[in-house]
């Protein structure tokens, strides 16, 4: 199997004001592959949530660390990978709550974001580090786009 190569990779400081640029990048990348505007916006929101979760939880609000986003088109998937070097997230915190548990009174902090991430992507693969860092691969099935 050939090695994965990134179509695009960007390093972003963890200042929440820079997430606007991330949203534009994700939107443009998906539009290039023919995803519908509705599907694109759903994914843009989910990537924004994943980045915000990293800033909030892994980096504890530190606005001077870095996130690395990689974009790649594989045979079956469009993959967006997010990596940080912050505190690893407990794997149980990465699971999506069931839709019936999405109620304001019962939702835990971050629960809605995890729900949105899992709802937007066909596969969500978390790989927390043992001492430092997290990596999440967010995958969209390419058959959902109308482009090549």
Image (cartoon, grey):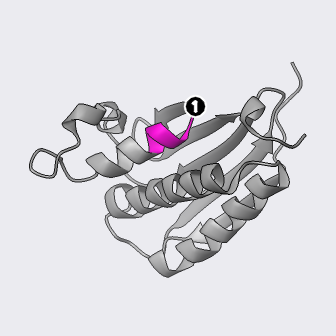
Callout 1 crowding tier (Cα within 10 Å): few <14, some 14–19, many ≥20: few
Residue found at x 81% / y 49%: 34
Q: Is residue 24 above or below residue 8?
A: below
- What secondary structure predominates along the stretch shown in magenta? helix
Residue 14 placement (x, y as % from top left): 49, 71
Number of disc labels: 1
Single out the residue that lies furthest toward the top: 1
- In which quadrant is the N terminus drawn? top right
Q: Which residue is mark 1?
A: 122
> In what element is the residue under mark 1?
loop
Single out the residue that lies furthest toward the left: 105
Q: Quadrant of residue 28?
A: bottom right
Residue found at x 71% / y 51%: 36
Q: Is residue 51 above or below residue 145?
A: below
Single out the residue that lies furthest toward the bottom: 17
Q: Is residue 37 left or right of residue 147?
A: left
Is 69 a magenta residue? no
Decide if residue 85 is in sight here.
Answer: no
- In which quadrant is the C terminus drawn? top right
Residue 23 placement (x, y as % from top left): 61, 67
Residue found at x 42% / y 47%: 116
Is 119 a magenta residue? yes
Q: Is residue 50 left or right of residue 26?
A: left
Decide if residue 147 is in sight here.
Answer: yes
Q: Is residue 122 left or right of residue 98?
A: right
Start-end of magenta stretch? 117-122
Residue 87 placement (x, y as % from top left): 37, 51
Residue found at x 41% / y 35%: 130
Q: Quadrant of residue 76?
A: top right
């Amino acid at each position: 199997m050939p090695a994965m190569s990134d179509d695009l990779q960007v390093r972003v400081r963890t200042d929440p004001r820079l997430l606007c640029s991330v949203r534009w990048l994700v939107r443009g990348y998906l539009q290039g592959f023919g995803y519908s505007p509705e599907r694109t916006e759903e994914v843009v929101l989910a990537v924004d949530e994943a980045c915000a979760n990293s800033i909030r939880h892994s980096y504890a609000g530190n606005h001077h660390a870095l996130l690395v986003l990689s974009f790649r088109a594989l045979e079956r998937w469009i993959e967006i990978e997010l990596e940080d070097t912050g505190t690893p997230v407990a794997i149980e915190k990465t699971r999506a709550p069931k839709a019936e548990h999405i109620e304001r009174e019962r939702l835990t902090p971050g629960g809605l974001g995890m729900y949105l991430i899992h709802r937007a992507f066909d596969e969500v693969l978390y790989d927390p580090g043992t001492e430092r860092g997290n990596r999440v691969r967010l995958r969209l099935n390419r058959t959902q786009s109308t482009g090549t």
